[in-house]
Image: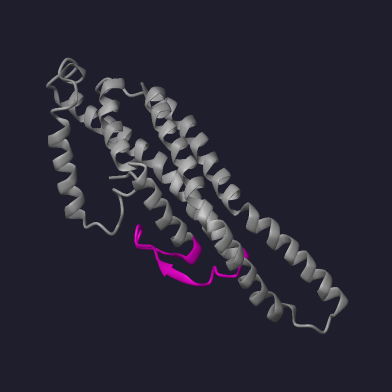
Amino acid sequence: MTAPYFNSAAFPRRVKLFLSLILTFILSFVIPEESVMGLLRPTLPFVASAIVLELLVGVAMGLVGQLIFAGIEMAGRLISLKITLSFAQIVNTMTQQKTDVVGNLFSLLAIFVFLSMDGDKIFINGLVKSFEVIPLNQANLKQAGPFMLEVANYLFVIAVQIAAPFLVVLFILDLSLAIFARIMPQANILFIAIPIKLLLGFTLLSWLLPYMPDAFGKMFERLFQYLVNLLGTMA
């Protein structure tokens, strides 16, 4: 429910609940019995703590994926800000919240790349793996905190890496316009700068967009490695 694609606001809550029940039924035949039944004690405190702890393990796994997608969307927001498109807001179909045009474009492209790499199946396999690696009600959540901070740092690295060509080129453009404004103080720089930034931004976007799926794919490969490391950290 917290993993990328599965948490999309485009899916009704009843559909998500039904999918959760179906996955629970299917995975009950796949999860090794000894990894659960041998540790299960039918006491209310044990069952309550086990439910909360397993819920937090699932939330942590989903948040790892969400941080990668947040970094990609942040890159789109940085680009929109530099090419003066930040004022154009549209509704993101994944979150049902207003966002900028480039950020929404990157989010949709990232979802397509994520599904083409079988990212949804990898998260479901991660659920099974979590029961094999982490004993029931014995997850070490204290170790997950520093690891999540490491993933959060990677969020900002992603944003800067994707937006770097736009940041560098548009910084040079701003510097040139500043020099031009000093040479010709009577010129309306704001009126001149907006169309130039838009034209240059769309040109860069058209050149770089074909390479974005490969870049997103490498980031998702790191995401899958983060999932494995997270389960190992909490084991």
* Quadrant of the frame with the N terminus: top left
Q: Quadrant of residue 86?
A: bottom right
Percent position of residue 178, x then y: 80, 69
Tell me the residue at 67%/74% (across/down).
Answer: 196
How far from the left and from the top, in percent, is residue 144? Answer: 42, 29
The answer to whether 102 appears left or right of 27 in the picture is right
Name the residue located 20 percent from the left edge and 30 percent from the top edge. 48
| Residue segment shown in magenta | 82-102
The relative height of residue 196 versus residue 74 in the rendered view (above or below) is below
Answer with left or right where residue 184 lies relative to residue 1: right
Q: Residue at x 16, y 36 (%)?
A: 24
Give residue 198's quadrant in the image. bottom right
Residue 140 or 13: which is nearer the viewer? Answer: 13
Q: Residue furthest right?
A: 183
Where is residue 75 drawn, in percent x and y? 54, 54
Locate the C terminus by quadrant.
Answer: top left
